[in-house]
Amino acid sequence: LAHLKAQLEEYLRPYPKVRILRATTRLGLIQARIHGAKNTSAPLLTFLDAHVECTIGWLEPLLEQVARNDTTIAVPLIDRIDDHDLHVIMNVSSHIFGGFEWDLNFGWWYRGMFPRREAIHKLPSVPFESPVMAGGLFTISRSFFARLGWYDEQFRVYGMENSELSIKSWMCGGRILAVPCSHVAHIRKSSHPYIGQKYVNVTLVNSVRVAEVWMDEYKRIVFDVNGVPGYSEQLFGSVRDQKAIRERAGCKSFQYYLQRAYPEMPSPIVPGQFRGEVHNAALGNGTCLTVSKWSKGPTMEPCLSQDSQAQFWTHNFYKELNSYKRCIHAVSSEHLLIVMCHRMRGAQAWSYNVRSLQLKSVAHQTCLSIGAPLSNITRTVILEPCQERKLAQQWYAPLFQYDFWKQP
């Protein structure tokens, strides 16, 4: 883009303290931030998204908190810029705090829903703790950021870097403070058009890496939410360097994070949770529920191996039927597709009755069953009215429990 080259350099020429760092290749958001942070010398670093407007006096309150305690990450209250006419909506985040569910995607929670959060927030100008930050706007000590290993340098493009930094800051002796006297307005985009199809699973890779390094036994929940059987270095890369960073920093457990920073984390338990191959009673154990190469919907095909990415499934916290972040989506009361999981439940939510062995669409209240043959060895999978004794509606899958889960 021409305006980011000579035009930008001319615009900033009157400001001698401003340096423009240029990478030789596209780095993506995460790697660009690491590149910028490593090329600084100041003791405090402040990150801002490009699509923001800063209010008068926004910076000093953030610097004050980190100057008082160099293991504090200070974040402003985020006002909203309307993405249609650019007017600013003030104070939209004064009564909320950052959090996530088990997919580790950031979201907002109202403090009023949690008496503990509401009770400790007495004056509107007093900074308050947050278990997770949005990630685009914050001030951090450079030395603390370096001790935490910056961001994971094998993260792909975009996503989960805020959750990773939030988790490890709390586990490694720090905290996140939202600072009400600092306001920055931000445009919330409706989508991320710069993430092309080749990056479609970046959040899968990044979230699994976070879980493997930082979440101890709780990583199993994240694996299930993403429909993967476990950590694979071939798929997700080595995490040896990241685990060494955690060891050197003397960090506490993820259980500590839940107890100290995020006791509101929802229980991961839903009825009828399972992981592994899924078989149908009418076809026997030689065929498996499959993400087919030949059909847009799920099929029953000969079982390949325990390592098959097309035949591993989880029924998880989001009630999905999920295989490597590909979900069975009930388009109607009869029609099924395999699509990317959206985490909104709805047409991707299923219940598994461990007594009748039926898999029922929550949205349509119809049951998963076997349809017509596609070939000598492949059958379609359909939805049809539930009949409890019908063999084609009975599904076998390995159930499990999270024995380690204790409500913080």
Image: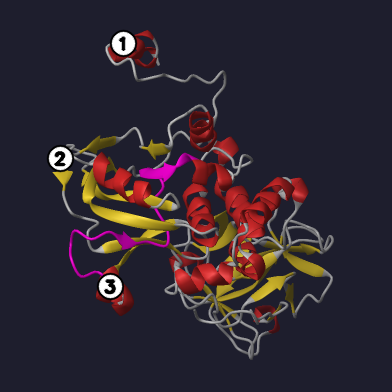
Q: Is 130 left, or right, of 255 in this rendering? A: left
Task: Say above or below: 338 vs 238.
Answer: below
Q: Residues within 10 Å of mark 2 (few under 14, many from 20)?
A: few
CA gap between label 1 and label 3 equals 47 Å
| Amino acid at circle 2 | His
Q: Which residue shows up at 66% across the image and 75% down it?
A: 274
Q: Which is more foreground, mark 2 or mark 1?
A: 1
Q: Which residue is mark 3?
A: 120
Amino acid beneath label 1: Arg
Q: Residue at x 50, y 51 (%)?
A: 165
Residue 269 x %, y %: 55, 79
Secondary structure of the residue carrying numbered label 3: helix
Which residue is nearer to you in this view: 314 or 375?
314
Segment tinted magenta in the rendering? 120-142
* Sooner in the amino-acid sequence: mark 2 or mark 1: 1
Label 3 Cα neighbours within 10 Å, binned few <14 / some 14-19 / many ≥20: few
Q: Name the spot of residue 149 as percent of width and height, x first.
A: 59, 44
> Whole-Å distance between the Cαs marked 2 and 1?
30 Å
Q: Which residue is mark 2?
A: 87
Asked whether 220 or 66 is in front, the reply is 66
The disc placed on residue 13 is 1
